[in-house]
Image: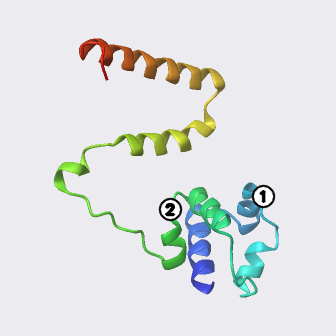
Amino acid sequence: MGDLYNAIDALLSEHGITGYKMCNDLGLSRSFITELRKGRVKSMKAETAQKIADYFNVSVDYLLTGAQKENALTESSKSEIGFDDFTYAMQNESKGLTEEDKALLLSMARQLKTARDKKNGGTD
């Protein structure tokens, strides 16, 4: 868990955030970062690791190993955004949207589907 502490500590420094603030923002105990630093934390829930990774916009792999996981992308797939990418992005981005914004996006998606259906002769 020492590497995990070092990765988190580096991210805290990089972002100018204290361990206390991170713990407070994420709903972790105030002693979490101290216990991690002192090596008293022997394991961590995957959910906690994901919360911390999301907080700093890094992968869990980065927290555990210090290196971002590289994706093996082909030249053609580098510029394409798949539906899974869109769904993932919307899942994360929707956290800050109002209910009105969400309804507007849903309406726009329905309009796009209707237009596609018409273009394709009414079939999917």
Q: Residue 98 occupies which quadrant of the picture?
A: top right
Q: How is the image coloured?
A: rainbow
Identify whether 58 is placed above or below 123: below
Q: Quadrant of the C terminus?
A: top left
Q: Callout 2 environment at 10 Å: few (<14), some (14 to 19), or many (20+)?
A: some
Q: Callout 1 environment at 10 Å: few (<14), some (14 to 19), or many (20+)?
A: few
Q: Amino acid at mark 1?
A: Gly
Question: Which residue shows up at 74% across the image and 87% down it?
Answer: 38
Residue 58 numbered tag = 2
- In the displayed structure, does residue 124 sit left or right of residue 92? left
Instruction: Identify the mark nearer the N-term, 2 or 1.
Output: 1
Question: Which residue shows up at 62% across the image and 36% down it?
Answer: 96
Q: Residue 43 occupies which quadrant of the picture?
A: bottom right
- In the displayed structure, does residue 89 sit left or right of residue 97? left
Measuring from the top left, give residue 45's x and y in whole percent: 68, 70
Q: Which residue is mark 1?
A: 27
Question: Which residue shows up at 50% across the image and 62% down it?
Answer: 58
Identify whether 8 is placed above or below 16: below
- Front residue of 115 and 44: 115
Identify whether 38 is placed above or below 17: below
Q: Amino acid at mark 2?
A: Val
Measuring from the top left, give residue 76's x and y in whole percent: 18, 49
- Front residue of 113 and 92: 113
Farthest residue in the front direction?
123
How far is the residue under mark 2 from the one under mark 1? 19 Å
Question: Which residue shows up at 41% across the image and 15% down it?
Answer: 111
Helix, strand or loop under label 1: loop
Measuring from the top left, give residue 122's x and y in whole percent: 30, 13
Q: Residue 50 occupies which quadrant of the picture?
A: bottom right
Q: Quadrant of the N terminus?
A: bottom right
